[in-house]
């Protein structure tokens, strides 16, 4: 049943339409239904009018009108986030940046590109074909997710092991703040003097303002790339191999593990010839100059052998390499073949403790009678355990939540953190207090308030405020009602 | 608030609807989302709105209709979906439900009726062709700019090793494609018999428009008129996809057996084309391949096109994952704005790739795409026309074609 | 035994206070207010975990000491500074190494910081793992803040493997040509007539790249050129004796330099930050990160 729109909405819509045009505002029930959620399993959000600005000025207009009407605003890219960062609470104006998808300028010599926030990550790299450069952050959603969204979540991806997460690739960003002013943070070359406001803004989950133009750094394509697929009897063996590879003093471009259940699911989709009988596979990508890559291939093979590797398949060409990666990057979606819903975690643990943590995670899932699947960025200890479930089965949600909380506690007790790359959003804010003291959180609050003193930018995200989202009771502490 | 009668009307399999985990990986593969950036015009959004209508969370209003009616049904999302959501079935079920509630516009209904009367269609087309020649016919966007006055000039065989499915509008408007197809297949040593006007239209456009019952009847007619066990070759990707789906449309085992006989002509040539003459590497023209959605996303036969073209040309890719050009059967009539925008995007990409690669020839294995792109000034050949050109004069492949920059009339 | 509790007690919760490391860049961004009490962060290395590629270290530790310990396991950190510089000092200045293209930026290297705030309370920024998207990026604000937001006691830093081989070359090739003919060199400097390039990695790769550069007249030299002590932002021309760091746009030069003009809108955010973190202005009074020239 559609929810009543709050009083004053008609005036708000009229002002938005007057400011940016009728074809850029969607206020119907259908739009509000769709923009109430993202790729996370959080439901219960409530969207106000949805705007599709095409320029920085139009974003500023949206912010100005929203705030004048006493509404919050929520920036949104492609809506592929996994922690509910783009889920609107309390009928805010949703600012979708999907039409700000122009690649404004590419400077090959200086290795900088200015792009709109709505440019799809992979589109930029495709656009750069032939220049010998690429955009290094490659989250698994890269074919769909926008660079603005990547910036908001400080996204990672397999190759951030060697190249760093999004923040390392954002030189400068133009931002509309909640007072509708526009400011450029950072510098095209080198660091801006003063506080690193650019660095603080990246990863702000849309709570600090709206990114409207982004200067990204471009990375030269490596002269040599080798992709290896190693299979192991167990995920613990694979994890030990990862620890061994890092300890050997090399930093591969990527180190990814998929367990047997994941391998079965993705093989069905991509037919990449993944070994179906292995307990786990490890994808290792090595890149750089030829002699170094050759040396590192030998090191990886030796460490693999020390940990009982079965076969080592080396991708013969680009096509084979792309197929191996296609499987990895479609893993989350492909898992829907196993059960209709999954609850994905994103904890990071010290990479030397991967094996023991995975055993604990698997045991926790088993205690709650749930199937768990593991596919993750092993090289930086970034776990992605997925709890599979069918929400229609009575009592399942309770078990999923209990197991989920245990997984978070296991990671933190092992010296880990809540999120490696998906962010906190709505989903993990209730866990923030497990990791941070009230004084820690107060310092973070001081940062946030400096950017958004009005508290209008995507509120209720990140901090464990206790306030509920919309009319869904108790989202913070008793989230059962909002998981579907 | 949804109208209860409509909620009853839309009765999609809730299992299929919940298979979507909303990961969003379909978004970039959806031509209408690409153009609008609007979730309502995306596969993920459409699935959510189908579900929401069935659960009564949204009303059955113009916004909802527009979301469903703007889908081109290219099924690019389905190929991209790692969860295997049967989007084609969902949207087809939805369109059938809509067609019951909201009749199609009269001109479209007339047009679709005309397709079921091949001889009438031929007569009508010749009449239009004459009017075109004497400049009495205004420019109509979807009509070829030079309708043919006569049909195929090849003599008909009474029987052959394989059947060439000739369909409806293609037989009338692009007889030269069928001729080229026949010539290439016969060059491999097999004989071709044409299905002819008696077999008629495959019903793809009717199914596409939600006219499920008409499509069903036409399918039954096609099956009945093409008894025997020869393979049935199709040179129109849209028709091929429809014929291959008869088993699904009709269910009974003879329909499945029929569908098993159907091959896109390129699939057949990939198997039998070794005897075709090869062109030396030096003499090969660059050929830009535009993949019809129903060839790539539905039939998965786009690899065969490349394999076959590889005999005589350098295949040049558009590298857009086969994003739809916006033709979509009758879509360009019903949603001219979106169809035009999708087409212009594709045409711009084709020109860009042409400028970079120097390739002048553009091919598509679907007449709908060719006619649609022609309205943006891009001359598109069928791959078999390139092959046929090689048979007659290997040196002259593609010469004389206006190709990418061409703004001349359609056909030859 | 060091403890944050002791450091907190030393900082206290009232009165102006400034933290001093090696004092190598003590007047950068303005002279510290002479009435402010001077405190020192604890020193010492807590733990180095080579397989984790992180090191936990007290802010008062000198870079030299840290480098020696890390080198035993063939690792290094990004931080750079004149002899005597400390970890805390170098972080609060936030300057990048001239080898930034290999080892990354100072701002990317700080994973976790335990600090004493202006209210005399201890807070933690970031987390111990090499990847972390939990909450706001406080660590990035601390780097380059000249200690004006909080005083850092203990940090966890990312480490990097030491290169097997390291080689400096000098010659008349232009920096753009050097960049084009090498794959991600560690450093490219330009002194107005010569490029100075640092190649690092596996021996065979470094050798083959060096051979390529030698064909363009680049010759091996002992190390980087002497860098003059002052810094400026590259604006298109290079004064006599100055050296440009191509990756960061920093000009190392002799002579007075001025801080660049900053957009008032940026300064407004900075002012709110300072007010929110240190409403009384008691932390490192007199120092202002916006008074640094580059």
Image (tube, coloured by chain):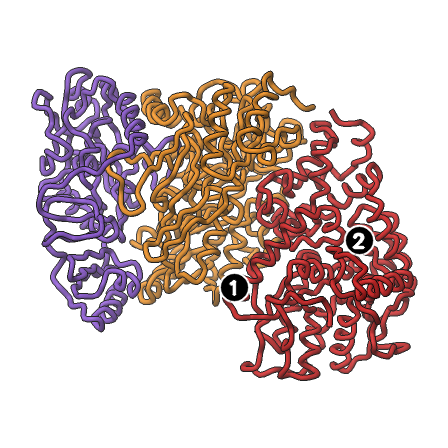
Left or right for A323, reference C262? right
Q: Position of residue A271 (x, y in %)?
A: 59, 58
Q: What is the chain letter for disc 2?
A: B
Please tell me whether residue B336 is drawn above or below residue C59 in the rendered image. below
Residue B78 - label: none
Residue A319 - label: 1
Question: Looking at the image, can residue B215 be seen?
Answer: no
Please tell me whether residue C128 is drawn above or below residue B315 in the rendered image. above
Instruction: Give the letter of the purple chain.
Output: C
- Label 2, label 1: how far apart the Cα atoms are: 36 Å
Residue at 21 percent across and 17 percent down: it is C280
Q: Colour of chain A?
A: orange
Q: Secondary structure at mark 2?
A: helix
Quadrant position of the C terminus of chain A in the picture: top right
Instruction: Give the letter of the red chain.
Output: B
Residue under numbered circle 2:
B205
Q: Position of residue A40 (x, y in %)?
A: 55, 35
Left or right for B233, reference C187? right
Q: What is the chain letter for disc 1?
A: A
């Amino acid at each position: 049943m559609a929810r009543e729109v709050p009083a004053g909405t008609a005036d708000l819509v009229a002002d938005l339409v007057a400011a940016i045009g009728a074809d850029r505002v969607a206020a119907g029930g259908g739009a509000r239904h769709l923009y109430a959620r993202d790729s996370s399993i959080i439901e219960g959000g409530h969207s106000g009018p949805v705007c599709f600005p095409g320029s920085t000025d139009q974003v500023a207009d949206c912010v100005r009108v929203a705030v004048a009407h006493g509404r919050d605003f929520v920036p949104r890219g492609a809506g592929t986030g996994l922690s509910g960062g783009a889920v609107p609470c309390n009928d805010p104006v949703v600012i979708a940046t999907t039409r700000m998808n122009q690649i404004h300028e590419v400077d090959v010599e200086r290795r900088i590109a200015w792009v709109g926030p709505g440019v799809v990550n992979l589109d930029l790299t495709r656009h750069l074909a032939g220049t010998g450069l690429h955009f290094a952050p490659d989250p698994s959603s890269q074919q769909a997710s926008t660079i603005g969204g990547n910036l908001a979540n400080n996204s990672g991806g397999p190759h951030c092991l060697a190249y760093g997460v999004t923040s390392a690739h954002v030189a400068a960003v133009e931002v509309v703040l909640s007072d509708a002013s526009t400011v450029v943070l950072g510098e095209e070359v080198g660091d801006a003097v003063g506080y690193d406001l650019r660095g603080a803004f990246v990863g702000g989950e849309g709570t600090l303002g709206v990114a409207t133009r982004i200067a990204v750094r471009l990375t030269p394509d490596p002269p040599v790339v080798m992709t290896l697929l190693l299979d192991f009897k167990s995920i613990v063996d694979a994890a030990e191999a990862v620890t061994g590879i890092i300890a050997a003093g090399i930093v591969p471009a990527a180190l990814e593990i998929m367990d047997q259940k994941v391998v079965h699911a993705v093989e069905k989709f991509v037919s990449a010839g993944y070994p179906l009988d292995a307990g786990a596979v490890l994808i290792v990508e090595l890149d750089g100059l030829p002699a170094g890559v050759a040396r590192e291939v030998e090191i990886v093979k030796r460490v693999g052998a020390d940990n009982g590797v079965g076969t080592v398949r080396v991708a013969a060409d680009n096509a084979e390499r792309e197929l191996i990666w296609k499987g990895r990057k479609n893993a989350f979606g492909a898992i829907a073949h196993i059960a209709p819903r999954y609850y994905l975690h994103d904890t990071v643990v010290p990479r030397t403790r991967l094996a023991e943590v995975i055993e604990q995670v698997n045991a926790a899932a088993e205690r709650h009678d749930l199937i768990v699947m593991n596919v993750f960025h092993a090289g930086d200890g970034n776990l992605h355990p997925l709890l599979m479930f069918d929400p229609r089965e009575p009592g399942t949600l309770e078990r999923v939540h209990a197991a989920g909380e245990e997984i978070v506690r296991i990671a933190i007790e092992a010296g880990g953190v809540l999120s490696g790359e998906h962010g906190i959003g709505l989903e993990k804010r209730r866990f923030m207090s497990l990791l941070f003291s009230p004084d820690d959180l107060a310092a973070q609050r001081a940062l946030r308030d400096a950017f958004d003193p009005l508290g209008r930018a995507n509120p209720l995200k990140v901090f464990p405020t206790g306030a509920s989202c919309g009319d869904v009771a108790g989202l913070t502490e008793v989230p059962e009602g909002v998981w579907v | 608030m949804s109208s209860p009668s409509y909620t009853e009307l839309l009765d999609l399999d809730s299992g299929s609807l919940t298979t979507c985990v909303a990961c969003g990986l379909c978004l970039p593969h959806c031509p209408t989302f690409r153009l609008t950036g609007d979730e309502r015009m995306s596969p993920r959004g459409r699935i959510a709105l189908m579900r929401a209508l069935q659960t009564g969370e949204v009303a059955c209003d113009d916004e909802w209709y527009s979301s469903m009616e703007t889908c081109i049904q290219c099924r690019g999302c389905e190929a991209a979906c790692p969860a295997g959501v049967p989007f084609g079935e969902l949207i087809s079920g939805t369109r059938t439900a809509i067609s019951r509630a909201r009749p199609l516009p009269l001109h479209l209904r007339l047009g679709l009726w005309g397709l079921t009367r091949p001889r009438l269609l031929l007569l009508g087309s010749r009449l239009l062709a004459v009017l075109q020649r004497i400049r009495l016919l205004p420019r109509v966007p979807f009509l070829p700019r030079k309708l043919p006055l006569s049909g195929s000039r090849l003599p008909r065989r009474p029987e052959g090793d394989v059947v060439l499915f000739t369909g409806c509008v293609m037989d009338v408007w692009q007889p030269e494609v069928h001729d080229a197809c026949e010539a290439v297949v016969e060059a491999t040593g097999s004989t071709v018999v044409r299905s002819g006007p008696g077999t008629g239209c495959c019903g793809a456009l009717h199914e596409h428009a939600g006219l499920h019952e008409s499509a069903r009847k036409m399918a039954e007619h096609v099956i009945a008129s093409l008894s025997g066990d020869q393979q049935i070759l199709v040179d129109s990707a849209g028709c091929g996809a429809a014929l291959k789906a008869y088993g699904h449309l009709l269910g009974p085992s003879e329909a499945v057996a029929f569908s098993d006989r159907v091959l896109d002509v390129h699939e057949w040539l990939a198997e039998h084309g070794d005897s075709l003459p090869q062109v030396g590497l030096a003499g090969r023209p660059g050929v830009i391949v535009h993949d019809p959605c129903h060839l790539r996303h539905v039939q998965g036969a786009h690899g065969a096109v490349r394999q076959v073209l590889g005999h005589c040309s350098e295949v040049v890719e558009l590298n857009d994952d086969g994003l739809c050009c916006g033709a979509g059967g009758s879509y360009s009539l019903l949603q001219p704005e979106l169809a035009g925008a999708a087409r212009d995007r594709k045409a711009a990409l084709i020109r860009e790739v042409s400028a970079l690669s120097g390739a002048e020839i553009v091919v598509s294995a679907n007449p709908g795409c060719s006619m649609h792109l022609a309205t943006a000034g891009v001359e598109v050949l069928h791959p078999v026309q390139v092959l046929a050109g090689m048979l007659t004069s290997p040196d002259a492949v593609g010469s004389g074609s206006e190709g990418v920059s061409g703004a001349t009339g359609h056909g030859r | 035994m060091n403890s944050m509790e002791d450091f907190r007690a030393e900082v206290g919760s009232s009165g102006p206070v400034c933290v001093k490391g090696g004092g190598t860049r003590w007047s950068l961004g303005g002279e510290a207010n002479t009435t402010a009490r001077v405190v020192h962060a604890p020193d010492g290395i807590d733990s180095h975990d080579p397989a984790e590629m992180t090191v936990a270290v007290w802010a008062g530790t000198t870079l030299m000491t840290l480098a020696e310990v890390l080198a035993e396991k063939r690792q290094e950190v990004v931080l750079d500074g004149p002899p005597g510089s400390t970890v805390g000092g170098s972080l609060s200045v936030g300057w990048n190494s001239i080898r930034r293209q290999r080892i990354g930026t100072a701002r990317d290297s700080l994973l976790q910081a335990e600090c004493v705030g202006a209210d005399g309370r201890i807070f933690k920024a970031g987390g111990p793992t090499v990847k972390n998207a939990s909450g706001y990026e406080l660590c990035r604000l601390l780097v380059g803040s000249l200690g004006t937001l909080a005083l850092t006691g203990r940090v966890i830093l990312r480490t990097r493997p030491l290169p097997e081989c390291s080689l400096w070359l000098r010659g008349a090739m232009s920096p753009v040509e050097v960049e084009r003919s090498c794959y991600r060199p560690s450093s490219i400097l330009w002194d107005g007539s010569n490029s100075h390039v640092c190649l690092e990695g596996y021996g065979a790769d470094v050798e083959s790249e060096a051979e390529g550069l030698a064909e363009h007249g680049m010759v091996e030299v002992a190390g980087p050129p002497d860098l003059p002590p002052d810094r400026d932002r590259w604006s298109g021309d290079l004064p006599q004796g100055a050296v440009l760091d191509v990756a960061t746009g920093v000009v190392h030069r002799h002579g007075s330099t001025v801080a660049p003009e900053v957009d008032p809108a940026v300064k407004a955010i900075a002012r709110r930050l300072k007010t929110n973190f240190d409403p009384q202005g008691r932390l490192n009074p007199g120092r202002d990160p916006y008074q640094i020239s580059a």
